[in-house]
Image (cartoon, rainbow, N blue to C red):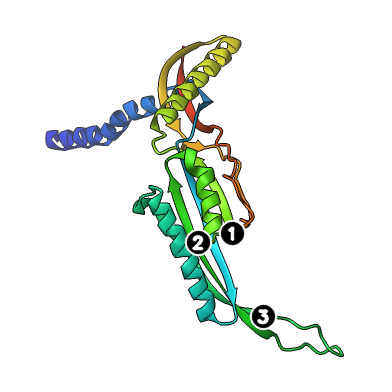
Amino acid sequence: MAPILSKTLLMTALLTLPLGSAAPVLAQEAKPREAVISVTGDGESAVAPDMAVVNLAVVKQAKTAREALDENNKAMNEVLKALKDGGIAERDLQTSGFSIQPQYNYPQPVDGQQQQPQLIGYQTINSITIRLRDLAKLGQVIDQSVTLGINQGGDIQFTNDKPQAALEEARKNAVAEAVKKAKTLSEAAGVKLGRIIEINENAPRPMPQPAYRATMMKEADAAVPVQSGENNYSVSVTVTFAIEQ
């Protein structure tokens, strides 16, 4: 009879082991969640721009595509030569668009019947993007380009070649604001602010600057007046703090 009793005790012990080992897990799951407070802080930093990105274009129309292209090429080559002679490097000049399009005249309907469009010529557009690192020359560059054949303008975007310092300042301001908010909220709630658990930063973004748009006319006889202002860089961070119990 003794061997049978031993087997029974062994099986009972094995069956009770999983329940005993699960006890720490249940105790761990029952642990109260840590109290936290999450706040968002925004920071800005203003800095004068040191570079302008300018979009300019030559638009020509002629009876044939060949004539329109030749006229456009002549004007654009003169513009590019003047820009390079003025000290703008090859790497700061980039063709940003080119097209040749037929131009049609659409006659009014006759007796309610639509008339066939009439081909009247061709239009060529050649666009360039200029990165100008000397802002003092911006008005002169626009004026000279118009004189040489630029007759359509796009945007002027004032930017910074190396905005890292401004972004770092904006980050510091954002974190400082988040800490200030957290202290205010914790004091209002009657709790004590603890350690920082997590900091998340949103993608930094320069605030948009007013764009300069114009149709460039040949009558311009002086440097175009342009104001560069300041660039504002903003950063947003979310900071999570522990609340001391």
Determine the residue positioned at 42% across, 34% down: 163
The N terminus, quarter of image: top left
Q: Which mark is residue 112?
A: none
Determine the residue positioned at 27% across, 36% down: 15
Category of crowding for the residue at label 1, using alpha-carbon neighbours closer than 10 angstroms: few (below 14), some (14–19), many (at least 20): some
The residue to which callout 2 is attached is 127
Q: In this rendering, does residue 94 appear at all?
A: no
Q: Are marks 3 and 1 in contact (CB under 8 Å)?
A: no
Determine the residue positioned at 73% across, 81% down: 106
Check disc 3 and give the amino acid type.
Answer: Tyr
Q: Quick one: 150 or 108, which is closer to the camera? A: 150
The residue to which callout 3 is attached is 104
Q: Quick one: 222 or 208, which is closer to the camera? A: 222
Q: Which mark is residue 152?
A: 1
Name the element at disc 3.
strand
Measuring from the top left, give residue 178's x and y in whole percent: 51, 21
Give the farthest residue toward the left: 3
Judged left or right of residue 124, residue 172 is: left
Judged left or right of residue 141, residue 215 is: right
Please tell me in which quadrant of the rendered image residue 116 appears: bottom right
Of the image marks 3 and 1, the number of the one nearer the N terminus: 3
